[in-house]
Structure formats: C-alpha cells, structure tokens
Image (cartoon, rainbow, N blue to C red):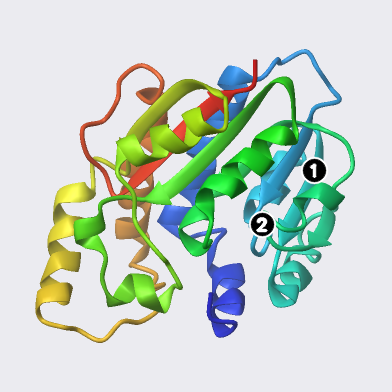
Amino acid sequence: MEKALYREMYEMEARHWWFTARRCIILQILKRYLPRDNPELRFLDLGCGTGFILQALEELGAVTGMDVSAEALAFAATRTRARLVRGSVPEDLAGLEGKFDAVLMLDLLEHLDDDNTAVKAAAELLVDGGILIVTVPAYRWLYSPRDLFHHHRRRYSREEVRALIRSAGLYEILTSYYNCFLFPPAAAQRLWCKLRRVEAGADLWEPPALVNMMLEKIFSAERFFLGRISFPWGLSVISVARKN
C-alpha cells in the first residue's frame, strides 16, 4: 500500500462505513465460531495495518498484529495494546511464538506473491480447533487500475479461495461472496471507471453522514446471513475454516 494512505486510513477507519461494517461482520463470526467461555483466547491479525481490527479484538483475548509496514504499526501502537510485530507473510511467520485460536488474513492475500504458501503457513499457527478467517477482493473481471494502485496482484473467485483453504488442510466452515447488497451499483461504477480509463486513486472518500450511516447498516446486515446462506455475488470473498 502507498505509505501516504496509512494516515488517511487511520483517521477515517473509526467512522467510515466500509471499515466499521467489516469489523462488525468479523467480530460476529469470531463470536459465533469460537468458544465464549474461554478468557484466554489468542488472536493473530496478519496484515494488521493501522490496528482498527486489533483494537476490537482486545475485548476477546490476547492479540498479536503483524504488518510489513513500520508506518502502519506506528499508527497501530497509538490505538491498541496488542503485541505488534514487523514482518512479512509468509516469510516471517515461523518466528512467531506459540499457537493461536484465530488467525485473520483480511484483504492480505491479494498483495502476496505466493498466496498458497501464506495460507498453509497461517494454518500451522492455529491450535487444534482454531479458525482462520480470510477475506479477498472478488472477480478477476473487476481488476482495474484501482487494484494496481493498491498493489493488488489478483482478485479471486469463491472457488479459488476454497482451493486455498483445502490445500492448507483446513475444514471449510463457510466460503461466500460478501458485500453483496451493495454489489450491483459498486460493480457498475468500477466497470465504468475501467472502461473510461479513469485514473486510479485511493478512493477513501467519506460520504455525507446520513449516506455513510445507511451504507454501514446495509453492509453490516450481512452478518445475520453469513453462515446461514452463501451469497451468490459480492465485491469480496470471505472464508472461515477450522483446523481439525
């Protein structure tokens, strides 16, 4: 990611609809699939960025965050007490101590050269019964200059994510498209920009408060359906898998 974006993300995450809704969905999944009576759960957020997810995970247990960016970790240190480690995935995962009840790879794999090795290495860090949560951008046909700007090497289909999970020897609990309800207008807008060759940018703009609230409620409502149904389309893919 461009270094200049980290400050923008840090200042915007706590109120921007996409970040707050995604965090709400991830927390709901963790509470659904992890034991609620264990006060000593251990969490690892790979590609933790500026620490917005880490901050929420602290309510559930002990938290470690890893990111390749020193700038991102500096921002994370101001909002969380989590253990912060600078390192690359998968190269530096072997240096982490212990095992974890949950490992998160949120919008990380698309940045890596070897996503298959990364998922396998993350799976090795799970305790028996631990869960891995993966999110990635969906559909190769949506790949655009915007992805290049954000240093995305690829976008994924649902089946490609399933193949990564199975290759790591994990039991698939859930693999679905998500950010489904907002998909039609968002996909149309991105295709229009792609066809018109609109110059890529950070696109981290904040909509008016009422619009922001409506978008957050629409996106976060998907937490009530994920795990019960598999959405047929969406801007991203989410997968939850367990180590048996």
Q: What residue type is labelled 1?
A: Val
Q: Name the residue: 40% across, 78% down.
A: 149
Callout 1: 10 Å neighbours few (<14), some, many (20+)?
many
Residue 182, x across and y down, in percent: 23, 48
Q: Name the residue: 60% across, 28% down.
A: 30
15, above or below 106, in the image: below
Comes first in the chain, label 1 or label 2: 1
131, above or below 177, in the image: above
Q: Can residue 190 be seen in this view?
A: yes
Which of the 4 image quarters holds residue 98?
top right
Residue 33, x across and y down, in percent: 59, 19
Residue 61, x across and y down, in percent: 80, 33
Q: Name the residue: 21% across, 32% down.
A: 232
Foreground disc of the pair 1, 2:
2
Which of the 4 image quarters holds residue 73?
bottom right
Residue 102, x across and y down, in percent: 69, 32
Per the rendering, the mark at residue 138 is none
Q: Left or right: 20 with respect to 236?
A: right
Q: Nearer the viewer, residue 91 or 192?
A: 91
Q: In the rendered image, which quarter contains the C terminus?
A: top right
Q: Whole-Å distance between the Cαs marked 1 and 2? A: 17 Å
Residue under label 1: 63
Q: Can residue 59 be seen in this view?
A: no
Q: Left or right: 98 with respect to 75?
A: right
Per the rendering, the mark at residue 89 is 2
Q: Left or right: 78 with respect to 129?
A: right
Q: Nearer the viewer, residue 70 or 118?
A: 118
Q: What residue type is labelled 2?
A: Val
